[in-house]
Image (spheres, rainbow, N blue to C red):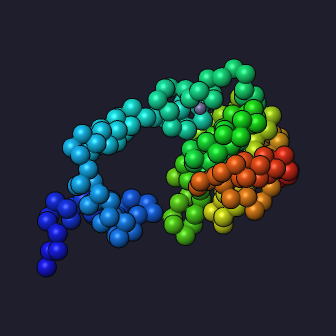
Amino acid sequence: MELYSGHINKLIEELAGLPGIGSKSAQRLAFHLINMPQTRVERLANAILDAKANVRYCKECYTLTDHEICPVCANEKRDHGTIMVVENARDLAAYEKTGKYEGVYHVLHGAISPMLGIGPNDIKLKELMQRLEGDVNEVIIATNSSLEGETTAMYISKLIKPTGIRVTRIASGVPVGGDLEYIDEVTLLRALEGRVEL
Ligand code: ZN
């Protein structure tokens, strides 16, 4: 038996396919959307389409940006010889919020996970190795402290070691990503300062 209209069901289904949204949340959101004024729904729909049409990967660090080169990579005052490797753009934003990191980034868009079938070729690793052919002094690996993050860190360090470029890892036990508040900025900076050689 169909409890809701087919249109609502379709909306719930689409919302439930988003990360972190269970079927209950999807239902709540669907009904909320239906009850929103038409103009707000259009604004939301347009924002999604607009972002999808205009956001792309930075040609250098692969973060998401409206431009060919993101503001961090375009900034000549940044230290382009220090590259911090992060799993996603949220982690980049977290470090950027501290305002204390002066290097540039490389966004992998994921982490190696044999369990989920995500291998080195599924993340932006080749692209990182290409960047290292330039003038790079240090690669700071700031992947998460999860099993996947650690696996990725070890894999990257093994790849980079032979090049002679310095490879470091931020201090472990730091929750990177998610909603990082002020206290976490301090933790992030401490992790960065306490980074160890790999
Ligand atoms: Zn960039």
Taking depth in this image into account, of 176 and 80 the one nearest to the observer is: 176
Quadrant of the image occupied by residue 20: bottom left
On the image, the x and y values in percent for residue 25 come to 37, 66
Residue at the extreme bottom of the image, as rendered = 1
Q: Does 84 appear above or below 33?
A: above
Question: Going by the image, does 29 lie left or right of 147?
Answer: left
Which quadrant of the figure shows ligand 1? top right
Question: Going by the image, does 81 lie left or right of 12?
Answer: right
Q: Does 48 appear above or below 15?
A: above
Quadrant of the image occupied by residue 35: bottom left
Determine the residue positioned at 73% across, 58% down: 174
On the image, the x and y values in percent for residue 70 come to 56, 29
Do we see residue 151 in this rendering?
no
Determine the residue positioned at 26% across, 61% down: 31
Quadrant for the N terminus in the image: bottom left
Question: Going by the image, does 145 lie left or right of 30?
Answer: right
Taking depth in this image into account, of 158 and 180 the one nearest to the observer is: 180
Quadrant of the image occupied by residue 19: bottom left
Determine the residue positioned at 52% across, 52% down: 122
On the image, the x and y values in percent for residue 40 come to 28, 42
Question: Going by the image, does 91 lie left or right of 80?
Answer: left
Determine the residue positioned at 73% across, 52% down: 183
How many numbered marks does the figure carry?
0
Taking depth in this image into account, of 83 and 91 the one nearest to the observer is: 91
Do we see residue 196 in this rendering?
yes
